[in-house]
Image (cartoon, rainbow, N blue to C red):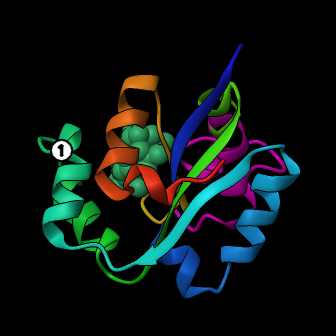
Amino acid sequence: MATQRTFSIIKPDGTKRNLTGAVNAVIEAAGLRIVAQKRILMTRAQAETFYAVHAARPFFGELCEFMTSGPVVVQVLEAENAIAKYREVMGATNPANAADGTIRKLFALSVGENTVHGSDAPETAAIEIAQFFAGNEIVG
Ligand code: ATP
Ligand code: MG
């Protein structure tokens, strides 16, 4: 399989607890390269666009509130099979179900405050990367 890119977010619960470096260490130890990264405060509009697929879910308002409650670190990760690899490194959405050694098992507080986001497919990865990064901000 060719080199692939995925989009990652270190969520506000992670930045609040000063875990950016700790999360990045797990990412890098798994063989994913951080080829773009910036710390931003997401606007409500950005959060609603980003999670539009969940707009009808009961937790949508809470999710957008959380994602704009503090800084996030948006990233592009590169590796062979990066999308599936990062989903594995992140662990299950609910940390109670996450495997040992995964980012969510190590750091997540709850199903909502679960420390990281990772794209779930090549199509969504491309859309999510383009929402936050210009091509010349990604250096592999
Ligand atoms: P992400 O898209 O953030 O990588 P995911 O793909 O593992 O996470 P999704 O089903 O896409 O999970 O849900 C998106 C996000 O919405 C979750 O990461 C979590 O922050 C929040 N979420 C999901 N389910 C719930 C819930 N039952 N209650 C509160 N928040 C939830
Ligand atoms: Mg998802």
Q: Quadrant of ligand 2?
A: top left
Q: Nearer the viewer, residue 90 or 33?
A: 33
Q: Which residue is mark 1?
A: 52
Residue 91 is situated, as x and y percent measured from the top left of the image, at 66, 43
Please determine whether, in this image, residue 90 is positioned above or below residue 4.
below
On whether residue 15 falls in the magenta region, the answer is: no
On whether residue 100 falls in the magenta region, the answer is: yes
> Measuring 54% from the left and 48% from the top, which residue is drawn there?
94
| Mark 1 residue element | helix
* Span colored in magenta: 87-110
> Measuring 60% from the left and 41% from the top, which residue is drawn there?
92
> Please, what is the three-letter code of the amino acid marked with disc 1?
Ala
Tell me the quadrant of the picture where the N terminus can be found.
top right
Which of the 4 image quarters holds residue 87?
A: top right
Q: Nearer the viewer, residue 22 or 106?
A: 22
Q: Label 1: how many residues lie within 10 Å, few (<14), some (14-19) or many (20+)? A: few
